[in-house]
Amino acid sequence: MYNFNHEDLTNIIQSLTKLPNTLIKYELYGGRHYIPLSFITKFTNLQELVLSFHIYTYNNNYFKYFEKLQYITFTQLKILKFLFGHPSVEVLIKFLENNGKNLKEFHICCSDNSLCLAIAKLCPNLRKFFSIENNDLELLKEFFVSCQYLESIEIWCGNNYLNDKKVLEVVAYYSPRNFYELKLYYVINTKSGILSEELEKFFINWKNRTSQKSLSFIIEGYNLEMTNEIKEVIEKYKKFGTVKECEII
């Protein structure tokens, strides 16, 4: 459901409440509109929930009605996405206490350490997580240790975020057995300092892991220059089967 123009949603919401409790996916893009969310409590069989408010700035106030959901258990919920902001930390943690264990995929801009730590503890079965946006390397380690089924993660690098070289070290030594996809997002005006020999060291460490899963390495932002040396390293480890893909966006 899309509402970017402050439309009156009363009739639409009333219609939604009449739907049977068989709805498995719901997406709400509310723009700058405060939308009651209590009607969602009826759909306890949801498998995927996407909520997005205020497309220009991160503003938790637009999620104030999410408190109506914090005590509801969605036993089938596997995918949860908050685009552009999220509910208050306290409310969201309470929601995860009831629903985090079943989550397989979680999208949220996680910069609060207490929230990131709670996600790691309360969502042990996550396969995909996007994204970590702080500078606490120990928290990243804790995430890998707690989420042993994790397969993919996005991490912000540069400026006040994590150092990319240190991230590669942590990923190589702490990521769980089934992990195979690393996404590094570089903030504006940030450039990666990863050199070809450092990238090769990371690939060597990955090659020596017991999991033997080929790595998908995706870099987004103004960052790693594709020098001939780096291209050679990537192609070398693609031939070895260590790297499945290495993409710079």
Image (tube, rainbow, N blue to C red):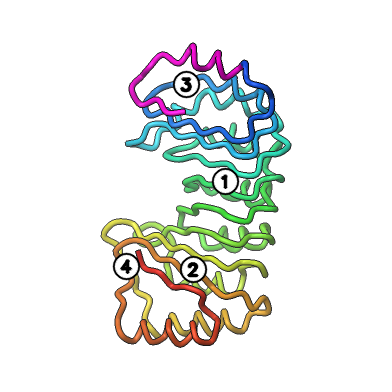
Which of marks 3 and 1 precedes in the sequence?
3
Q: What kind of element bears circle 1? A: helix
Residue 113, relative to residue 7: is it above or below?
below
User: Which of the two discs, 4 and 3, sits closer to the camera?
Assistant: 3
Residue 215, relative to residue 60: is it above or below?
below
Q: Mark 1 points at which residue?
A: 114
Which of marks 1 and 4 precedes in the sequence?
1
User: Which of the two discs, 4 and 1, sits closer to the camera?
Assistant: 4
- Which residue is pictured at 57% across the width and 58% down the height? 139
Start-end of magenta stretch: 1-17
Q: Mark 2 points at which residue?
A: 167
**189 sits to left or right of 79:** left
Q: Name the residue under label 3.
A: 35
Q: Distance between the residues labelled 1 and 3?
A: 27 Å
Q: Name the residue under label 4.
A: 223
Residue 107, relative to residue 147: is it above or below?
above
Residue 80 sits in quarter: top right
Q: How far apart are marks 4 and 1 (CA)?
A: 29 Å
Q: What kind of element bears circle 4? A: loop
Judge the density around disc 3: few (<14), some (14-19), many (≥20) Cα neighbours within 10 Å.
Answer: many
Disc 2 marks which amino acid?
Val
Which of marks 3 and 2 precedes in the sequence?
3
**199 sits to left or right of 181:** left
